[in-house]
Amino acid sequence: MTGLTLLACDALRYLQRTTAVFDIVYSVFGAIGLVEPRQLLAAIARHLRPHGVLAFSVPHPRRAGGEASEGPQPRHSPLRLPDGSRAPLPRWELNGAGWRRALAQADLRTTAVTELGHPGRQHPTALMITARRN
């Protein structure tokens, strides 16, 4: 596709250093949710064209029966490293309303929040969210 740029990098650092402007920012279980939302969403908003689209998916906070994070503090989930050891991984696990608030604070207008699930699971497994820059 002409004009398509795919990146695999430290998203916040990239956005802090680039002058690029995007029509669409798309993240599938990527940096969103792993980086403090106020910082990352504000950086994304600065680089979206007016009415540009942000589309992302994150693990659902209730996927294992738990609840969404309250406030700006992340949960620390164990991450298994290649050597078999584990390290704490900070993850902001907001529910749909929490993501709507975080997006609004970054001047992004939520257009859809969809809970995704698996027929064999009791709880939803992911959130798919779209927003537009105001």
Image (cartoon, rainbow, N blue to C red):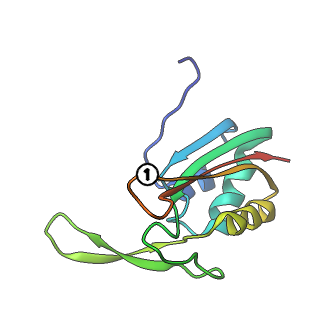
Q: State the image coordinates of residue 101 (x, y, percent, origin top left).
A: 76, 67
Report the residue at 24% width, 69% height from top. 80
The 10 Å Cα crowd at callout 1, few under 14, some 14 to 19, many 20 or more, is few
Q: Residue furthest left?
A: 83
Residue nearest the viewer, comparing 125 with 92: 125
Q: Is residue 4 above or below residue 94?
A: above
Residue 115 or residue 48, whichever sits in front: 115
Q: Is residue 68 left or right of residue 106?
A: left
In the image: residue 10, left or right of residue 107: left
In the image: residue 107, left or right of residue 35: right
Q: Which residue is mark 1?
A: 118
Residue drawn 43% across the image and 51% down it? 119
Residue that protrudes farthest toward the right in the picture: 134
- Is disc 1 placed on a helix, strand or loop? loop
Q: In the rendered structure, which amino acid carries the disc numbered 1?
A: His
Residue 19 percent coordinates (x, y): 67, 43
Tally the numbered discs: 1
Looking at the picture, tell me which residue is in the foreground, 19 or 8.
8
Residue at 47% over, 40% down: 7
Give x and y (percent) for residue 124: 51, 60
Report x, y in % for residue 28: 49, 47
In the displayed structure, 62 sits above or below 126; it is below
Q: Nearest the camera: 85 or 127? A: 127
The vertical placement of 112 against 3, above or below, is below
